[in-house]
Amino acid sequence: MLQRSNLPPPPPMDEIESPSLFLDFDGTLVEIADGPDAIEPPGALGRRLETLANRFDGRVAVVTGRSLDNLHHFLGPSATFRAGSHGAHIEGPDREVLREARPLPDDAISTLADFAKETGLLYERKTHGGALHYRSNPAMMDQVLSIAEQVGEQHGLAVKQGKSVAELVWPGADKGGAVRILMAKPPFAGSVPVFLGDDVTDEDGMAAAREHDGFGIAVGERPFTNASYHLPTVKDVYEWLKL
């Protein structure tokens, strides 16, 4: 059942025994912007996340649809866990590779890029794929989803839909998979996973957290199926995390 603002706020962090934090990026740690390169992360966010991780013996991971190279561009080097490309690519502290993403077929990428060029939409090239953004022209949503589904079916790929964006990924590449992989490894194993996110792609992460006796926290006003608690804004996330 979809739920949103009727959900209660999460309990204070110090009331959660041995929490692990899995944090979405766009819409959770940074405000949504007109394009992926237009975001304005708070100052020294990478260092602040590292300080947060130190409070919980390293049990903090940023889990994002962005490529890890792009995430590193905005956060800089940091001794924290990071999962990019919707969990297809996972790195530990100091960029130790825990899961390597497979590149998407060149034909699939070029088809999306050509469509974006023809329609004036933004195509975001990623290390292991690409995404079509239609925030500048919401009326294009149906066409974007149609071309993404056609290309996905042709190449055996799955379509990830987010806020004004559609992306092709390999089947099984989702944020829930990232949570499961990390929860099987130290320092996360045996802890209580808490997943914070604002978009439909975060549902998988929240579901995986529940599988491990944890919970999800919905950020913003999107209805969620797998969230147990709710924080209205990015600012509220920072206050709850004491970040």
Image (tube, helix red, strand yellow):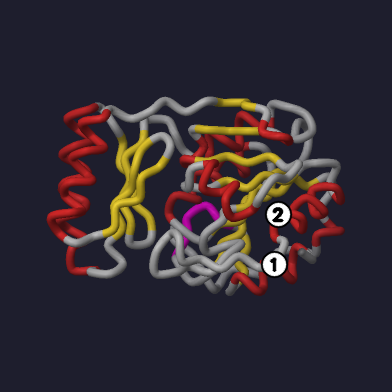
Labelled pair 1, 2 in contact (Cβ < 8 Å): no
Question: What is the span of residues highlighted in magenta in the rendered image?
Answer: 223-227
Label 2 element class: helix
Front in this rendered view, residue 186 or 91? 91
Percent from the top left, x then y, of residue 213? Answer: 69, 41
Residue at image point 69% right, 67% down: 43
Using the rendered view, name the quadrant where residue 165 is placed. Answer: bottom left
Front in this rendered view, residue 180 or 40? 40
Left or right, 233 with respect to 154, comes to: right
Residue 13 visible in the picture: yes
Q: CA distance from mark 1 to mark 2?
A: 8 Å
Using the rendered view, name the quadrant where residue 241 is placed. Answer: bottom right
Q: Which residue is mark 2?
A: 46
Label 2 crowd (10 A; few <14 / some 14-19 / many >=20) = many
Label 1 crowd (10 A; few <14 / some 14-19 / many >=20) = few
Q: Which residue is mark 1?
A: 43
Q: How many marks?
A: 2
Using the rendered view, name the quadrant where residue 144 is placed. Answer: bottom left
Tell me the quadrant of the picture where the C terminus can be found. bottom right
Residue at image point 73% right, 36% down: 93
Tell me the quadrant of the picture where the N terminus can be found. bottom left
Left or right, 187 with respect to 128, comes to: right
Left or right, 143 with respect to 47, comes to: left
Residue at image point 36% right, 30% down: 170
Q: Is residue 225 magenta?
A: yes
Amino acid type for the residue under numbered disc 2: Gly
Percent from the top left, x then y, of residue 178? Answer: 57, 35
Amino acid type for the residue under numbered disc 1: Gly
